[in-house]
Image: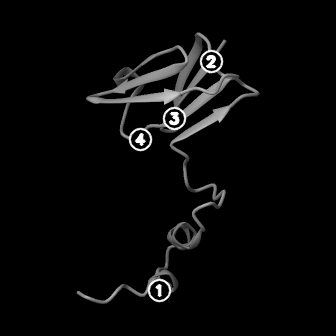
Amino acid sequence: MGSLPNWNAIISSNPSEDAQDLLSAPASSSNSNVMEPVKFDPSKKSVSLFMPGFDKSDIKYRRGSELLVEAGDQRRVIRLPPEIQGKVGGAKFANKKLVITMR
């Protein structure tokens, strides 16, 4: 119990290529298999939130300089960059992501 696991041996012995990619990717890597929890897109004036385990009917949101997102018994306040702040223009939920577009 006192020794650390040999991650190189674990990664090389795992037959799953997805697991190998995920475990061997550097933390700052732009690995397409890893979803960012919050992603801002100023060109589209949108915010994408990775929300696995929820349905669209579970999610509520409010706007302003901050976005308050409620899902089930969880709440999250997301500070919006100035170029994205405004009123909510629309929202869609697909592939475990809530994408909110501001106007």
- Percent coordinates x, y for residue 77 in the rendering: 43, 28
Specify few, some or many for label 1: CA neighbours under 10 Å numbering under 14, 14-19, or 20 or more. few
Q: Where does label 3 land, which residue? A: 49
- Horizontal side of 35 relative to 75 (left or right) equals right
- SS for tag 2? loop
Give the CA distance from mark 2 to mark 3.
Answer: 16 Å
Quadrant of the drawing holding the C terminus? top right
98 to 3, vertically: above or below: above
Give the CA distance from mark 2 to mark 1.
Answer: 47 Å
Q: Where does label 2 land, which residue? A: 85
Q: Which numbered mark, 3 or 4, is in the foreground of this view?
A: 3
- SS for tag 3? strand
| Chain-order first, disc 1 or disc 4 | 1
Image quadrant assignment for residue 84: top right
- Horizontal side of 32 relative to 77 (left or right) equals right
Residue at horizontal 58 percent and vertical 14 percent from the top: 90
Residue at horizontal 36 percent and vertical 39 percent from the top: 53
Labelled pair 4, 2 in contact (Cβ < 8 Å): no
Specify few, some or many for label 4: CA neighbours under 10 Å numbering under 14, 14-19, or 20 or more. few
Q: Amino acid at mark 4?
A: Pro
| Chain-order first, disc 2 or disc 1 | 1
- SS for tag 1? helix
Q: Amino acid at mark 1?
A: Ser
Q: Where does label 4 land, which residue? A: 52
Q: Which numbered mark, 2 or 3, is in the foreground of this view?
A: 2
Specify few, some or many for label 2: CA neighbours under 10 Å numbering under 14, 14-19, or 20 or more. many
Q: Nearer the viewer, residue 85 or 25?
A: 85
Q: Amino acid at mark 3?
A: Leu
Labelled pair 3, 1 in contact (Cβ < 8 Å): no
